[in-house]
Image: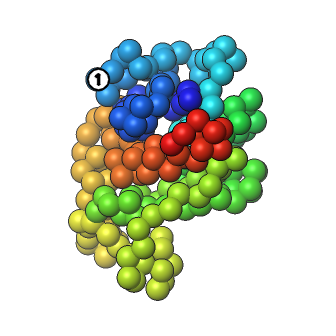
Amino acid sequence: MKVLIACEESQEICKAFRELGFEAYSCDLKDCSGGHPEWHLKGNIFDFIDTINFDLMIAHPPCTYLTVTGNKWMKLEYANRFPTRKQDREDAVEFFMKLYNSKIKHIAIENPVGIMSTRLKKADQIIQPYFFGDEAMKLTALWLKNLPKLVHQKEPDLFSCEVTHVPKGEQVTFKSGKKMAKWYVDAAKLNPHDRAEIRSKTFSGIAKAMALQWGTFITKKNGTGC
C-alpha cells in the first residue's frame, strides 16, 4: 500500500504511516523538516501522482486564499492593495479540485472551513486536535473520497454543545476579551516562514488516527490484512 501525503514538509503524517509499516511519502516543493529525506518527494505533486500508483492521498493544499478568514481581503476597498486576490483564489480552488479529482482512489483533503464548502461540497467531517488526545484547538475540515470519517474518543461533555466552540488547551485572553489558542499566538511571534509551517503542521494524535484507521480500512478492503 502506497500513501502520498501531499503538501507536507513536516512529515508528521508520513511518519505515522511508516511506523505502521506502510510505504508512505511526504511531498512538497520544499525540503522536508521531519528528518527523513529518503521518504520525501520534492517537486510538483502532480508529477508524482501521474507516475506512481498511490492507494491513498492525504492532501494539505495551501489555505491562504481558501479560508473564511481571508474573505475580508476580497472587499472592494482592498482591491488596490491586493489586485490579484480574486485570481489567487481561483487558482487555489483549481489546485484543490485537481487534487480531489486525481486518479487516486482514496483521498482526504484537509483545510480550514472556507470557500470549498460551496465550490465543492460541505466538508464531510470537522475535527479538533483534542478529539484525538492533543490538548489544543485547531478547527480542521476534511473532504473525504472513498474513506470513512475518523472515529475519535468521545469525552462525556464533548457533544453537549457545538463542538467547534468547546475550549480546550491553554488559551490566551486579549484585552478585548477575545480568546485564542496559546500555540497559535506563540506561532505569531515567529518569522512568516516558520509561523506558516508551525500553523500548518498536523497534530500527532490526528496523524496517528489517520494512519491507523484509514490504513486499516484500505488494507482490509483490499484483502491484504490489517
Q: Is residue 85 visible?
A: no
Q: Position of residue 43 (x, y in %)?
A: 53, 15
Q: Nearer the viewer, residue 171 or 86?
A: 171
Q: Quadrant of residue 80?
A: top right
Q: Nearer the viewer, residue 189 or 156?
A: 156
Identify the residue at horizontal 40%, vertical 37% (top origin).
20
The vertical placement of 36 against 99, above or below, is: above
Side of 47 where 216 appears, left or right: left
Q: Is residue 152 visible?
A: yes
Identify the residue at horizontal 36%, vertical 52% (top origin).
205
Q: Quadrant of residue 18?
A: top left
- Residue furthest bottom in the image: 160
Tag 1 residue: 35
Q: Position of residue 212 (x, y in %)?
A: 45, 47
Identify the residue at horizontal 42%, vertical 78% (top origin).
158
Q: How is the image coloured?
A: rainbow
Side of 24 where 37 appears, left or right: left
Q: Position of residue 143 (x, y in %)?
A: 64, 51
Amino acid type assigned to the residue bearing label 1 in the image? Gly
The vertical placement of 94 against 150, above or below, is: above
The vertical placement of 184 against 108, above or below, is: below
The vertical placement of 95 against 52, above or below, is: below
From the image, which quarter does the N terminus lie in? top right
Q: Position of residue 50 (x, y in %)?
A: 69, 17
Number of labels in the image equals 1
Q: Nearer the viewer, residue 144 or 213?
A: 213
The 10 Å Cα crowd at callout 1, few under 14, some 14 to 19, many 20 or more, is few
Give the structural element (helix, strand or loop) at label 1: loop
Q: Nearer the viewer, residue 181 or 135?
A: 135
